[in-house]
Amino acid sequence: MTAPSKEVLRVTRLSAGYGPLTVLHDLDFTVHAGERIGLVGLNGHGKSTLFRAISGLTDWQRGSVQLSGHEIGGTRTQGAGRNTHRIVRLGLAHMPQGDAIFPGLSVAQHLDCGAYTRQAWRERVQRRDAVLKIFPPLSKLLDAPVGKLSGGERRMVSLARGLMVDAVLYLVDEPSLGLAPKISRAVMDALMRVDLQGGAMVIAEQNMSLLEGRCNRILGMHAGQLKGSA
C-alpha cells in the first residue's frame, strides 16, 4: 500500500473578507506534497481572496489554516499583512495576479527582490540561474528595465521572482491574465517545469483549458465556496 503524501496545506472552516463583506464561506481545502491543483472560477468569486487569506492579507478571517503543520490562520479582525513575513519564512510563495512589478528596476533586480530569506539571498546567483532555465527568454533581458518589456515578459518576471525561494507552497494567481493564448500556454508550461521538491502549487485561472492535463486536480470556486474534491 502506498503511504499517503504529507499535507502541505490544510484549510478548515475558513471564512474571510473585507470590511462588512464576506467573500469566503467556511471553506475546507487540503493540498498534499507533489500536487499541482487548478482553481477555476470567474472574477469576483473568491480565488484571489483565498490566496490572500492563506497569506494573511485579508481584512479579517476566521478558521484554521495550517502550512506544513504550522497554524497561520485563526481568528483575526484586523492587521492585514502583519504576519505575512512570518508566513513567507515558513515556505509560502504568493504570486499575485497582474504584473506586480517596479517599472524602473531591471529584471535581475526584480529576481533578487524575490530572494527574501537569508539563505535565498546568499544563494541568489545560483537561484537566478535555476529560474532562468524555467523562463529562458529572460536570460537576455537581465539588465533591461522591466517597465519596457512586453506583457508576457513582465508576467514571466513576476512569476520568476516568486520562484527565488524554496517554497513548500506556491500560490499562482491568474498567470494568463491579459496574455495572448500562445503566451499563456508558454507561461503555463514554464510553471509545469518548476521542481516542487516535496512542495505543492495551486494555480488560480479562469481558462480551464490551460489547466486540463497539467494539474492533479481541478477545483471550482463559485460565490466563495469550493466545488469538487477539496
Image: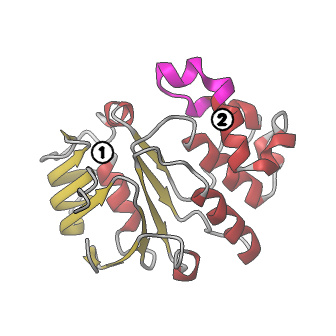
Could you tell me which quadrant the C terminus lies in? bottom left
Q: Is residue 66 left or right of residue 107?
A: left
Q: Nearer the viewer, mark 2 or mark 1?
A: 2
**20 and 58: which one is in front?**
58
**Left or right of 11, for residue 152:** right
| Residue 105, visible in the rendered structure | no
Would residue 219 be counted in the magenta stretch?
no
Q: Which residues are magenta?
A: 113-126
Type of the residue with mark 1: Gly
Amino acid bearing label 2: Leu
Assess disc 1: are there few (<14), some (14-19) or many (≥20) residues with their C-alpha within 10 Å of its C-alpha: many
- Left or right of 51? Residue 112 is right
Asked if labels 1 and 2 touch by Cβ distance under 8 angstroms, the answer is no
State yes or no: residue 121 in magenta: yes
Q: Residue furthest right?
A: 140
Which image quarter: residue 38? bottom left
- In percent of width and height, residue 212 lies at 52, 79
Give the residue drawn at x 18%, y 62%.
15
Q: Is residue 50 above or below residue 55?
A: below
Q: Residue at x 51, y 34 (%)?
A: 165
The residue nearer to you, when weighing 190 against 3, is 3
Q: Of marks 2 and 1, which one's residue comes earlier in the chain?
A: 1
| Colour setting | secondary structure
**Secondary structure type for disc 2:** helix
- Residue positioned 58% across, 76% down in the render: 210
Question: Residue drawn at (73%, 42%), measured in percent from left and top?
Answer: 132
Q: Which residue is mark 1?
A: 56
* Image x and y of residue 144, in percent: 84, 38
Q: Secondary structure at mark 1?
A: loop
Q: Which residue bears the numbered disc 2?
A: 111
Q: CA distance from mark 2 to mark 1?
A: 23 Å
